[in-house]
């Protein structure tokens, strides 16, 4: 008997012991006289259940989790390889309430297939989007992206189609597609999950962008802290080249050329900003460029350049394959489609939730997150990374969409959601925001370089009880200067967490005694 067992090779699952579990399964089954066919997939995103394994049975895939290496002997003895009952048995994981209520479009294949199985990718709908883009032609392809309402799945949420249209309308010549995979926001991991779990989707999305605007070269700018994604992406690019017609001089027989490569960044947070990333790609120090000109007009090596992040580009194949109208049917107002939200922090059920825009913060925290890991009340949630605003409980019914969050002085950013219980010190969180900016600043502009240092010093003085009123007034002045005079979003957005903490959690800046 040869049984197929799926064990995630995703970095998050590996950090939770997936490799040891895989080895224990193979060794234990062999000792019992059974050969196991071990297959690796991306994580399904239910990280509180990792390592989550799936056994192929005549009735379908049966999941168990979380399965530690020490659990394997008892599971094998209970009939794991036949999908039999056990306290860790979850059944069909796609029927689990946490997954069944999601609307996975961008992450439709993650966890279902081997990330490097190109045939499985194509059988599951891969490369239909590229084929349609070649059929439509450049102008119609760009219009399709524009009509879908897709906005950049990063900080600015700029309409993707407008950016593509600008590059398309530049004079013919050298153009580039760049993917900003420098995922540095705290509590975010959707880029990593996608690159490790379904890399061909990103490759297809970048190829569609290339043929749509007339670019022949693409670069994935990946942070050095992602070695697993680096390995998977390079392997996938090699397979796409070897397959013939997916990358190279003649994409799908169209006569159009497109190829790409992965470049590693050194881990500077500032390189998440598009012009700093371009500087780094050109071999210089990651430092913000003064705009204009915009990258769409004069970007990488002085040529018109598309700069999108991983989730934006990986969403494009779905839009082209199914049509702009089908994608636009998800979401509400000016927030169309779906967004992969990433739950982290003090939360019982952390993981990736892809839903249409409009889910409320409370629904995400309670229905998906299950409340805090500590069992204490959730007091604050930060959305959009270390530069995102802190929301108090009174704002938890805010829909997760761009305009609704903007109306309360918050941002959605990359979709990271970090929860804190009632023991959190919001003064310390505000001080940390300033310190983070000081450490990560490229140093080009004075408001960011100096303002963040002085802000951290002033908030530390508040924590010591030194002249609180004067120090807090100074922090407000510094925030105003940083917000209005910084060259980029690092200095310009650092006031968001600081001012929201001061506004909604004022008692922490006056010596509140925190919960024990």
Image (cartoon, rainbow, N blue to C red):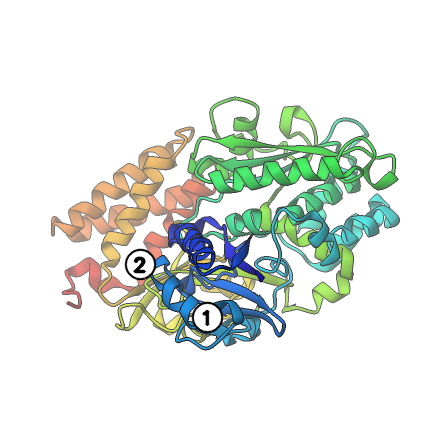
> Where is residue 426 drawn, in percent x and y?
26, 58
| Residue wearing tag 1 | 364
| Closer to us: 329 or 21 | 21
Residue 13: quarter of image? bottom left
Q: Residue at x 72, y 50 (%)?
A: 119
Judge from the rendering whether residue 297 lies leftward or rightward of residue 252; answer left or right.
Answer: left
> Where is residue 175 drawn, in percent x and y?
73, 31
From what the image shows, is residue 43 above or below residue 134? below
> Where is residue 54 drawn, in percent x and y?
52, 64
Q: Quadrant of the C terminus?
A: bottom left
SS under mark 1: helix
Disc ID at residue 338: none
How far apart in space, not on screen, are marks 2 and 1 (Cα)?
21 Å
| Closer to us: 458 or 361 | 361
| Closer to us: 165 or 468 | 165
Give the mark nearer the N terminus: 2 vs 1. Answer: 1
From what the image shows, is residue 491 above or below residue 151? above
Question: Visible in this render: residue 49?
Answer: yes
Judge from the rendering whether residue 128 lies leftward or rightward of residue 367; answer left or right.
Answer: right
From what the image shows, is residue 314 above or below residue 100? above
Q: Residues within 10 Å of mark 2 (few under 14, many from 20)?
A: many
Looking at the rendered image, the disc whose residue lies closer to the viewer, 2 or 1, is 1
Judge from the rendering whether residue 151 lies leftward or rightward of residue 461; answer left or right.
Answer: right
| Residue wearing tag 2 | 501
Q: Residue at x 38, y 42 (%)?
A: 481
Figure disc tally: 2
> Where is residue 304 drawn, in percent x and y?
70, 32
């Amino acid at each position: 008997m040869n049984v197929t067992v799926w064990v995630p090779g995703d970095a998050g699952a590996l950090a939770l012991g997936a490799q040891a579990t895989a080895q224990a399964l193979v060794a234990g089954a062999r000792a019992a006289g059974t050969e196991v066919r071990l297959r690796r997939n991306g994580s399904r995103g239910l990280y509180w259940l990792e390592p989550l394994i799936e056994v192929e049975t005549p009735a379908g895939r049966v999941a168990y989790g979380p399965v530690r290496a020490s659990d394997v002997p008892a599971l094998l003895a209970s009939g794991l390889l036949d999908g039999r009952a056990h306290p860790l048995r979850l059944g069909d994981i796609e029927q689990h309430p946490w997954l069944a209520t999601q609307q996975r479009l961008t992450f439709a294949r993650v966890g279902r297939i081997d990330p490097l199985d190109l045939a499985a990718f194509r059988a599951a709908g891969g490369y239909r989007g590229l084929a349609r883009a070649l059929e439509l032609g450049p102008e119609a392809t760009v219009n399709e992206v524009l009509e879908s309402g897709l906005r950049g799945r990063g900080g600015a949420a700029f309409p993707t189609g407008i950016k593509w249209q600008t590059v398309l309308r530049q004079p013919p010549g050298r153009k580039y597609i760049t993917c900003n995979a420098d995922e540095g926001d705290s509590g975010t991991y959707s880029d990593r999950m996608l690159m490790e779990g379904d890399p061909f989707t990103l490759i297809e999305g970048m190829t569609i962008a290339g043929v749509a605007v007339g670019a022949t070269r693409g670069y994935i700018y990946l942070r050095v802290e992602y070695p697993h994604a680096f390995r998977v992406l390079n392997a996938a690019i090699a397979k796409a080249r070897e397959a013939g017609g997916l990358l190279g001089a003649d994409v799908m027989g169209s006569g159009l050329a497109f190829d790409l490569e992965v470049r590693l960044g050194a881990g500077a947070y500032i390189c998440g900003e598009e012009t700093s990333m371009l500087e780094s790609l050109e071999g210089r120090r990651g430092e913000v460029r003064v705009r204009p000109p915009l990258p769409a007009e004069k970007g990488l090596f002085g040529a018109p350049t598309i700069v999108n992040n991983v989730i934006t580009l990986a969403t494009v194949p779905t839009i082209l394959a199914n049509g702009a109208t089908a994608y636009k049917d998800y979401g509400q107002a000016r927030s169309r489609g779906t967004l992969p939200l990433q739950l982290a922090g003090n939360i019982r059920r952390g993981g990736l939730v892809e839903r249409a825009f409009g889910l409320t913060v409370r629904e995400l925290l309670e229905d998906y997150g299950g409340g805090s890991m500590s069992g204490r009340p959730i007091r604050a949630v930060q959305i959009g990374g270390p530069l995102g605003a802190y929301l108090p409980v009174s704002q938890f019914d805010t829909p997760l969409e761009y305009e609704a969050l903007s109306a309360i002085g918050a941002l959605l950013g990359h979709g990271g959601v970090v929860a804190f219980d009632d023991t959190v010190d919001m003064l310390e969180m505000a001080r940390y925001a300033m310190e983070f900016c000081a450490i990560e600043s490229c140093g080009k502009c004075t408001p960011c370089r100096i303002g963040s240092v002085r802000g951290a010093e002033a908030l530390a003085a508040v924590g010591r009880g030194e002249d609180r009123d004067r120090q807090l007034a100074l922090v407000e002045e510094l925030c105003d200067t940083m917000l209005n005079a910084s060259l980029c979003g690092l200095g310009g957005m650092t006031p968001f967490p600081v001012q929201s903490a001061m506004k909604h959690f004022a008692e922490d800046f006056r010596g509140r005694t925190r919960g024990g």
